[in-house]
Image (tube, helix red, strand yellow):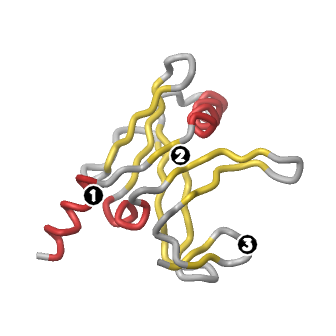
């Protein structure tokens, strides 16, 4: 029963990627010379608050249970983001953005499921 509920949640789940993040993903894939690669996002247990975000590149076909999200960059290039079903339960409704300031640059999650996060901004609780 619990597995069926999780499967239903991941089918109806959504995950957004901002236009700035799509462009950043496209640039990084081009830099790696893997334009057909994907960005894998997820969560893992750990960090100061219980969970931490994971962002890594994925070359090759998605895993069987991955949820695949396709986005289009400003020049029409397709960008693919992969999320495993367990991570998607916690990332449902989230947005991945690209932040660039004088002090730092990188991806930033806006996750409505976060109840609290640590001071470093890399871990959270739900």
Q: Secondary structure at mark 1?
A: helix
Q: Horizontal and vertical percent for residue 32?
A: 62, 34
Which residue reaches farthest left? 1
Q: Which mark is residue 78?
A: none
* Separation (CA) of disc 3 from disc 1: 29 Å
Q: Badge 1 local density, few (<14 within 10 Å), some, or many (20+)? A: many
Q: Which mark is residue 10?
A: 1
The residue positioned 34% from the left and 66% from the top of the image is: 86
Instruction: Tell which tag, 1 or 2, sits nearer the viewer.
Output: 1
Q: Badge 2 local density, few (<14 within 10 Å), some, or many (20+)? A: some
The residue positioned 61% from the left and 31% from the top of the image is: 23
Is 110 or 24 nearer to us in this picture? 110
* Separation (CA) of disc 2 from disc 3: 23 Å
Residue picked out by circle 3: 120
Q: Badge 3 local density, few (<14 within 10 Å), some, or many (20+)? A: few
Residue picked out by circle 2: 57
Q: Horizontal and vertical percent for residue 92?
A: 39, 59
Q: Quadrant of the N terminus?
A: bottom left
Question: Which of the two labelled residues, at mark 3 and mark 1, occupies the earlier sequence position?
Answer: 1
Q: Please say if 60 is above or below 82.
A: above
Q: Secondary structure at mark 2?
A: strand
Is there a contact, CB below 8 Å, between mark 3 and mark 1?
no
The residue positioned 19% from the left and 60% from the top of the image is: 8
Is 61 or 79 nearer to us in this picture? 79
The residue positioned 44% from the left and 43% from the top of the image is: 81
């Amino acid at each position: 029963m619990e597995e069926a509920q999780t499967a239903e949640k991941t089918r109806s789940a959504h995950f957004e990627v901002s236009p700035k993040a799509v462009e950043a993903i496209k640039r990084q894939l081009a830099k790696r010379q893997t334009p057909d690669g994907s960005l894998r996002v997820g969560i893992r247990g750990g960090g100061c608050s219980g969970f931490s975000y994971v962002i890594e590149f994925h070359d090759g076909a998605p895993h069987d249970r991955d949820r695949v999200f396709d986005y289009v960059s400003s020049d029409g290039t397709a960008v693919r983001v992969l999320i495993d079903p367990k991570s998607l339960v916690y990332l449902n409704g989230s947005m991945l953005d690209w932040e660039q300031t004088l002090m730092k640059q990188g991806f930033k999650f806006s996750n409505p499921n976060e109840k609290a996060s640590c001071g470093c901004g890399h871990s959270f609780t739900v």
